[in-house]
Amino acid sequence: MSEEVEKDTGEDSKELEKNYIPGRPYSRLRRELSEEDLTNPAVQKLIISDIDKLEVRISDLEEFQVKFYETDKEKAVLEEKLKGHNSHEILYSFCLSAGSGLLGISSLFELGEKGWIFLVIGGILIIGGILSKFVKWN
């Protein structure tokens, strides 16, 4: 009886083609070099060429690293300024709305009894809110 042999579909070669990056002619070469290979002038020139390319890439990346750190610092400073600005906006809005609310409530009471307290506190809150908007905090 003869056994059936499965037909080779070539799936293994498709897997290699997915990982293969064209434009890298030496990517499938064996990576180990013997002493005899290292004495070959052509191999030495290829290695020196690759070293030169890598040095150029390193210098480019060092520039990007410096720019990244500078930008990261600027970003952190701007975020802190924004947090302070937001807290001042909250203070401003709270003072104006609370002061306006107290001024509105003061009309429900007679000025001689408790109404004047609401007027004074509401006025102070409104003035404080306006001052918080225009005074720069350190």
Image: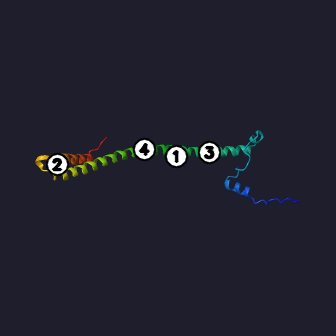
Q: Secondary structure at mark 4?
A: helix
Q: Is residue 64 left or right of residue 129?
A: right
Where 11 sits versus 57, above or below?
A: below
Q: Secondary structure at mark 2?
A: helix
The amino acid pointed to by label 3 is: Leu
Q: CA distance from mark 4 to mark 1?
A: 18 Å
Q: Secondary structure at mark 3?
A: helix
Reading the image, the residue beneath label 3 is 54
Looking at the image, the residue that sits furthest to the left is 112
Which numbered disc flags the more N-terminal residue, 4 or 3? Answer: 3
Q: CA distance from mark 4 to mark 3?
A: 32 Å
Q: CA distance from mark 3 to mark 1?
A: 15 Å
Q: Secondary structure at mark 1?
A: helix
Confirm whether residue 22 shows in the render.
no
| Residue that appears at 55% across and 45% down | 61
**Disc 3 crowd, CA 10 A, few/some/many (<14, 14-19, 20+):** few
| Residue that appears at 52% across and 46% down | 64
Reading the image, the residue beneath label 1 is 64
**Disc 2 crowd, CA 10 A, few/some/many (<14, 14-19, 20+):** many
Reading the image, the residue beneath label 2 is 119
Q: Is residue 10 left or right of residue 3?
A: left
The amino acid pointed to by label 2 is: Leu
